Image (cartoon, helix red, strand yellow):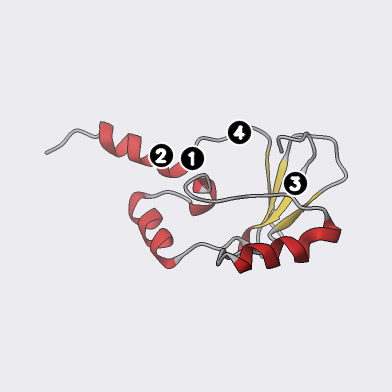
Amino acid sequence: YASGWAVEIQRDLVRTSDVTRKIMKIIGADPLFSLSSGTLLATVPSNRVKEAIDTLASIEVESTIIGSVLNKREKKLYLRERGGKETTISDLMQDDFIKRLCEIERTPKR
């Protein structure tokens, strides 16, 4: 996205821990839009993907391919859902986890 090239992500390939899913459900946040909370997203040339995955595995960091950079010069993220639904994201979004915590903090206490 920052490079100016469009990116396509397959939502069902994005790994989320059980704990993260449970916490996000409790506070009403979408784990996918909370990726800045401890996640590394990197683009790697196709001829170096195996090397990158192996290097991360050697230091016990899980990794997976979740999408690709498209041959489109536009700052957009295409999010593909299982079943074919596509969402296009063209603006940077605030981290959903942080947004929900701020909303909870502003809620009057009883």
* Residue 94 visible, this orientation: yes
Q: Report the residue marked by disc 2.
A: 98
Q: Earlier in the sequence, mark 2 or mark 4?
A: 4
Q: Report the residue marked by disc 3.
A: 7
In front: 81, or 15?
Answer: 15
In front: 32, or 54?
Answer: 54
Q: CA distance from mark 2 to mark 3?
A: 24 Å
Q: Report the residue marked by disc 1.
A: 95
Q: Is residue 70 left or right of residue 40?
A: right
Query: Can you say which quadrant of the picture contains the C terminus?
Result: top left
Q: Quick one: which residue is furthest to the left in this view? A: 110
Identify which amino acid the numbered label 3 is placed on: Val
Measuring 53% from the left and 48% from the top, which residue is drawn there? 35
Determine whether the residue tagged by mark 3 lies in a helix, strand or loop: strand
Residue count near mark 3 (Cα–Cα under 10 Å), binned few <14, some 14–19, many ≥20 = many
Residue 81 sits in quarter: bottom right
Q: CA distance from mark 2 to mark 1?
A: 5 Å
Q: Earlier in the sequence, mark 4 or mark 3?
A: 3
Which numbered marker is on residue 92?
A: 4
